Image (cartoon, rainbow, N blue to C red):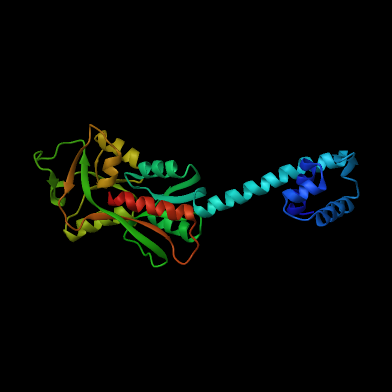
Amino acid sequence: MDIRQLRYFIAIVEERKISAAARRLHMSQPPLSQQLKAMEEELGTVLVERSGKFLELTEAGKSLYKYALQMVKLMEEAKMEIKEVGNGVNGRLSIGINTFSEANLSEVLQQFHKEYPKITYKIQQNESAHLCKLVKDRVVELAIIRLPLELSDFSVIHLKTEAFYFITSDMPKRPSDKEVSLAHIKNYPLILPSTEGLGVHYMILEAFSRSQIEPYILAECSDISLLFDLVASGFGASIIPEGVLQQYNNDQIKAFKISVAKLSSSTGLIWLKNHYLSNAAQNFITLLTNSEKT
């Protein structure tokens, strides 16, 4: 039996006449009668019996009718869900987020959820280099990363470029300044975000090197909430991108823009080139890029 025959059987049961069922199905009566006979022969049992002018279900027919309704319903739901997934209004959005994620990402996800309430999410946080590997391995479809990185295998949309800020719980020597230089903060014990050789960590040390300044590195910490707690407690100071500063407000921490033109951090949205990208992912790309323009 196939789904078409089950639909025929449901019509016969509900109309209680072959002729009425045939009209409902927009077909002639003989082929429908043949389909019913074929079903009974396949199952080896009688499904309907004539009672006067109408057909009545046998016990076997009642069982088949129950399952036929369930199977046809499941088929309709499957078709609907597949269409919705294809249209990007259903399915799963898998995305990787850099440790220093977008400040407005939660708002973007909230808006996306309002527009596509049936979408479910898989969100993974990690360093940018590892996120590139996750995208390559198809563990996630999209990733928001910190640049620069080798991205020849990916499609990339630049999201924003941010300045770096010096944060401390101690007042710098010139509290009226809104900006500080690397020379001004070289003697502060620094807690570098991220770890050696990765993204932001590398950019900060490179900026000191270009300026021929030797920083006082006290610690490294890739846990941003802990880093802010350490700075607030007076354990050390730090240098972070502006977007990270926007995410963590602390009255005990003072922030000063670093006046080095070449010390800035860019974020980008990536996905694998020449590979299928779900409509859910495409819809998210559209929403995120539009939000960055406003």
**Residue 262 placement, left or right of 150:** left
- Position above or below: 138 against 114: below
Residue 246 location, x and y as percent? Answer: 27, 41
**Residue 204 occupies which quadrant of the picture?**
bottom left
Residue 207 location, x and y as percent? Answer: 21, 57
User: Which sits in the foreground, 272 or 185?
Assistant: 272
User: Which sits in the foreground, 239 or 107?
Assistant: 107
Q: Is residue 45 visible?
A: yes
Question: How many labels sit on residues?
Answer: 0
**Quadrant containing the N terminus in the rendered view:** bottom right
Q: Is residue 223 visible?
A: no
Residue 104 location, x and y as percent? Answer: 33, 44
Residue 232 location, x and y as percent? Answer: 26, 34
- Residue at the location (43% across, 52% down)? 283
**Residue 261 occupies which quadrant of the picture?**
bottom left
- Residue at the location (13% across, 40% down)? 172
